Image (cartoon, coloured by chain):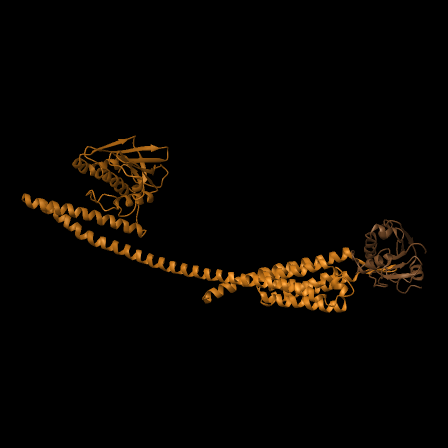
Chain colours: A orange, B brown
Amino acid sequence: MSFAPRSQELFEEHLTSIRQTTSRMFGWLMLAQYVGAIVWAKLATPLTWAGTQSSTHPHVVTAIVLGGLIAIPTFLLTVFKPSAPVTPWVVSVCQMLFSALLIEVSGGRIETHFHVFGSLAFLAFYRDWRLLVPATLVVVVDHFVRGIYSPVTVYGISSGAQFRFLEHSAWVLFEDVFLTISCLRGRSDMKVTAQRQFELESKNAELNAANELATIANLAKTTFLSRTSHELRTPMNAILGFGQLLGMTDLDEKQRDSLSYIMKGGQHLLGLINDVLDISKIEAGALGLTLEPVNVNLVLTAVANLTKPDADQKGVGLSIEEEGELIVLADRQRLIQSIFNLVTNSIKFNKPGGSVWLRCIPVGSENVEISVEDTGEGISEADKAKLFVPFERLDADAKGIEGTGLGLVLTKTHLEAMDGKIFVESEVGKGTCFRVLMRQYRADDPCAADPAA
Amino acid sequence: MTGRPTLVVVLHSQCPCSLATVSNIQALPPAVLQSMRIQFVVSGPDARTSGVVENASLVPGATTESVTENEALRQFGAQTSGQSFLYDSAGQLVFSGGLTDSRGHEGPSLGIQAILDCVAGRPCQPSLPVFGCAVQTPGAPK
């Protein structure tokens, strides 16, 4: 496995963190051991007697003085320099010295030797097998020296202990083997983790860079569309304007037919340009809205007037159902555009002889529902999910129905920008109903315009 | 001192090691306990009422005697608490030493093994070190 410099850095960071945490744990363990040794000595052998005279037992003195000399500096080091490279080595030596001290204070109890094994296992928390070396040396040397000069303090017996250090050392080495394997495997796992983290970081950086590029590209596209749409709309308005002027002149039937194609194509193109311009504005966050009290009844009437010629042409009945005068807080032009889009779709996707209903009703005291219901072919569940996707036209192209695939996208975006919501209910073969929920205008809304205007 | 072997155990009334010695004697097989006379000789402060005396009195068939440190030293030459003397049925000293392997350590020991061997008539260790408090007060007149 190739190990990148960053992976090495992450690995070292992890090791430092482990060193810090483990050293701190050892620091508190040192204190606990120190207190424990003193309490033990005081309870087990508080006094030594010579006839009628008593004095503090040497075990108590050893626990207090030698224990303090070992524990306190180690504790301070682990508190103030927990991540220093030297700290684990000091901990390693001092922890095993404390094992020796506890064995001494316990009068060489064999059970106390388990402290040695526990300490070695704890040292393996550092994931550094080298720390086991000084620890083991301390144990071996201590057992060897005391085995010769004071066997009763380490083995609890006074004789025949000169070579027991070999047996004890062998068991310590036995444990060292497994702890070394454990440390090496731990480090290996840490390296794998570091490598994976590095790869993850690299991928994230790549994704961020790609995302940044995509954002820049999208902004450029939006700017381009916005500018191009402006540039296209000006000549298109000229074409349509002069086309209208041309229509006022004496033209024969063939010329009038040709002009109607120009006008129809031009208006379609102008609608497309306007939609694209709107989308661009939305994407650029430049969609300007002027919220004001808007009379919904007037909006529905205006939309009905605008769409009636198309409805008549297709033989679709168009009717308005209202429940009193309802005022909502909205951008008048955008609300008309949104409802117009919905009604236009209801007519386009309807069948001859079908119907479209425009309704507005109050919903509680807070909201107004505007609905556009038709008797068209309906929309399947699968297609409903695609309704508000830009340029998604479902099967309109196959049916020869004109449009850009932007109308519903703009409608939803405009309505949501006006704090409104849009819902769709549909049943294939029966028809579709779009419901728009808008906030009802209240007298305390900060809008001065006349709703009836 | 005829008929049965006699085990004399000198104890310091306050020495924690004394309790380990008494426990080791208590743990001897009943047949061995019955086969010998056991006498605890206790010196030190509160020699009549200490926990050591209380424990020693629980050993079946044992007698306890409170003495001064000088008497312990004079009668038996005992220097250290826990020092035990086993006399055979003829009154000969066959073992002298401690019955624990170190300070305050209960359990099997070379001293206990020596007692078992001596009582059974097997060759036994004649002497062993003693772990315990000093019987004699430093500087006290002997």
- Residue B50: in sight, yes or no? no
Q: In this rendering, would A96 be left or right of B67?
A: left
Q: In this rendering, would A209 be left or right of B28?
A: left
| Screen quadrant of the C terminus of chain B | bottom right
Q: Position of residue B64 (x, y in %)?
A: 90, 52
Q: In this rendering, would A275 be left or right of B133?
A: left
Q: Position of residue A291 (x, y in %)?
A: 32, 43
User: Residue A439's image quarter?
Assistant: top left
Given residues A313 and A27, the one toward you in this image is: A27
- Residue A178: in sight, yes or no? yes
The residue sitting at 34% across, 59% down in the picture is A213
| Screen quadrant of the N terminus of chain B | bottom right
User: Residue A47's image quarter?
Assistant: bottom right
Given residues A78 and A442, the one toward you in this image is: A78
Q: Where is residue A247 in the image (x, y as percent from the top left)?
A: 10, 45
Given residues A194 and A256, the one toward you in this image is: A194
How many numbered dots are placed on residues in this image? 0
Q: Position of residue A169 (x, y in %)?
A: 67, 65
Given residues A94 and A315, the one toward you in this image is: A94
The residue sitting at 21% across, 47% down in the picture is A271
Residue A235, placed above or below residue A99: above
